[in-house]
Structure formats: structure tokens, C-alpha cells
Amino acid sequence: MNKKERIFYYDFLRAFAIIAVLLCHMDIFYGPLNTPLQVIAKYVLHDIGRMGVPIFLMISGALLLNKDYDLSVFLKKRFTRIIYPFIFWVSLLVIGLYVFHEHSMIIPVIIGDFSVTWYFWTLIGIYLAIPILNTFLKEYGETGMKYFLIIWFVTMIFKTFNSYPLFTNFNLDFFAGYIGYPVLGYYLNNKKFNISDKKLYIISIAALLISLGVYVYIDYAKLGLIELIYQNVPMIFIASSFFILIKSIDNMTSFEHIKNNAMGRIIFSISICSYGMYFSHVMVLKALSIVNPHSNLLFLPMFIALIFLSWLPVYIVSKIPYLKMFSGV
């Protein structure tokens, strides 16, 4: 799919999502936090960063659900798309761990324990389930989506309060994990709201600020209600309201003036490189930590450096014949 055929607000969401993930992993670059306001600011930035993973999953649902495709072709295409880059970038990461004599981290990195590679294994599970959900949604339409999302949302309420499962034999695991975000993304992408886009824009901003405020408060106050990070009610509202916000902006054609200028090209490039950046940024973080200034004033330059240096190797690899399939682009 070339740039003209792509839906810009998907690219915007995907570019935002990877930048959010990088922001979430910037904790080592903060300087001394001497006041409550500085501590809260760190929590706000960190929790904004946590939006990245749900947004990625919601985009996957918007793109992959309610489609006509052959099962074997779908699985081959999807798994090729994520497995080859995983092998390439994780191999480089493992080599780095070996060179720096961090041998004990090699297996945890590969299998996703205490490592960003957990997302790869989560995608494997989601892609295995997508054809099943796809058939279900094609058969039952919006009613089926609502049925699935209501059960998922109820399990998320229980998870938010660390009460799932209610008892051993009442098991809703198929509804209780990350799989709800792709269904939610598809639903919100296709939902026709009976209000104007301008009103939807205002409501989504208000919902985003309120839900983010609740999430930050729970996180800051250490209430122990969001230990699962992404699988809780406040995060569902944060991700949903942001998704709707960007969709409403796109519906109002407010992105038209940036689609074809330098900013649009940057967003497009970060979007198509996002999967590779997810892996490459781990090595960049390791390298930047060597020159870490531990300064709040230099946090922004370090963040920009992380974005650029995570994007650059992915972009370069994507331009090399026979290696593009490993880049993640």
C-alpha cells in the first residue's frame, strides 16, 4: 500500500503510538525530581506513554476485522510480517547482551519476560484469534461486537480491582485479555455517532483528560488498582477517547493541510517504521544510557534523539535489498 492509498489518521495513530511507547521507556533520563509537581509530571508523561500499546492493537482490529481472506494466506502474511523483524532485531539485541556480558538476560528477552518483546508474543496470540473473531463479527455484525465488548468490559472491571476471576470455575479468559482492544478499535472505527464531529471532538478531549487524570491519580497514589497496566477500565477510556479524538479530527478534514507537507511525510515514515522501532529502541536506550545527562532540562533533546536514532536504523535497513523484509517496514 503506497502513501496515497493509506488512511492518514491510522498513520497518525500508529506514529503517536510508537512515540508514546518510547516516552513510556524514558524513565532513566529524568533528572532529580525534587517537588511533588515534578513527580506528578513524570507520572503524567509515563502514563500518556502507556496509551501506545492499546492504540497499536486497536489499529490492528480496525484494519484486520470484517475482511474476506483465506485463512492460510492471512496467517502466512501476518506471521511473516511480524516474525522476520522479530528474529532480526532480537538477534542484534542478543548479540549486544552477549557483548556486554549480560548473559542472564538473553532468554528473558527472547521469551518476553521483563522485556518489550512480550508484545511480539501477544501479537502471535491475537493473530491466531483474529480469523475466529473475523468470522464471528461477519456473522453477527454490530450486535456481535457489542456482545463481545460488554463481556470484555465486565472482565476488565474485575481486573481493575484485582478480582478476576471471581472464582476458579467461572473462567472468561477468551474475553479477559488484550484481544478486546482490536475488537474495540474496529467498533470505534466503524461506529457512526449521532452528534457532530465538532461535539465529538470536544467530548473526546474531556473524556481523555478525565480518564487520564484518574489513571495518573491511581498510579501516583499507589492504590494498586492498575497493576496490569493495560487491562483496566481507565486505560480503556484513555485509548478509546484518544482514538475517537483523532478520528473526529480526520472527519473534520483538519489533517488535510499536513498530509502532503514535511510533517505528513515524517508521520508517514514513523508510522511505517513503527514495528521495527519498537525493537530497535531497546538498543538505542542502552546506548544513550551511557551518556545519560540525568537532567530534566535535557530530557526533551534525549527524547528526540531516542525517536530519531530508533527510526534511522529501521529506515536504513528497509532500503537495503533482501533486508527490507527484516526491517519491520
Image (tube, rainbow, N blue to C red):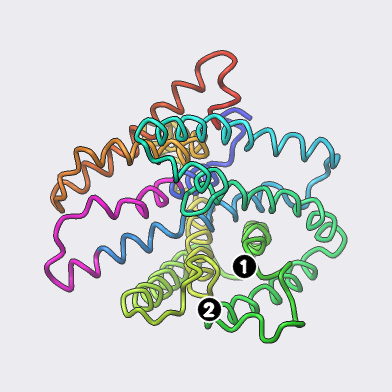
Residue 82, percent across and down? 62, 38
Quarter of the image that includes the C terminus: top right
> Please, is residue 89 above or below residue 32 in the view?
above
Q: Residue at x 74, y 77 (%)?
A: 171
Residue 83, label in figure: none
Residue 71, percent across and down? 84, 42
Q: Is residue 238 left or right of residue 29?
A: right
- Disc 1 or 2, which lies upstream in sequence? 2
Q: Residue at x 41, y 72 (%)?
A: 206
Q: Which quadrant of the view contains residue 183?
A: bottom right
Residue 220, percent across and down? 31, 75
Q: Which residue is mark 2?
A: 160
Q: Is residue 275 visible?
A: yes
> Please, is residue 206 above or below residue 269 in the view?
below
Q: Which residue is mark 1?
A: 193
Magenta: main secondary structure? helix
Secondary structure type for disc 2: helix
Q: Residue furthest top?
A: 321
Q: As shown in the figure, which amino acid type bears the numbered disc 2?
A: Thr
> Please, is residue 269 above or below residue 201 in the view?
above
Other-residue count near label 2 (Cα within 10 Å), few / some / many at <14 / 14–19 / ≥20: many
Q: Residue at x 31, y 51 (%)?
A: 26
Indicate yes or no whether the magenta region holds residue 245. Answer: no
Q: Nearer the viewer, residue 69 or 260?
A: 69
Q: Nearer the viewer, mark 1 or mark 2?
A: 2
Magenta-drawn segment: 18-41
Q: Is residue 199 visible?
A: no
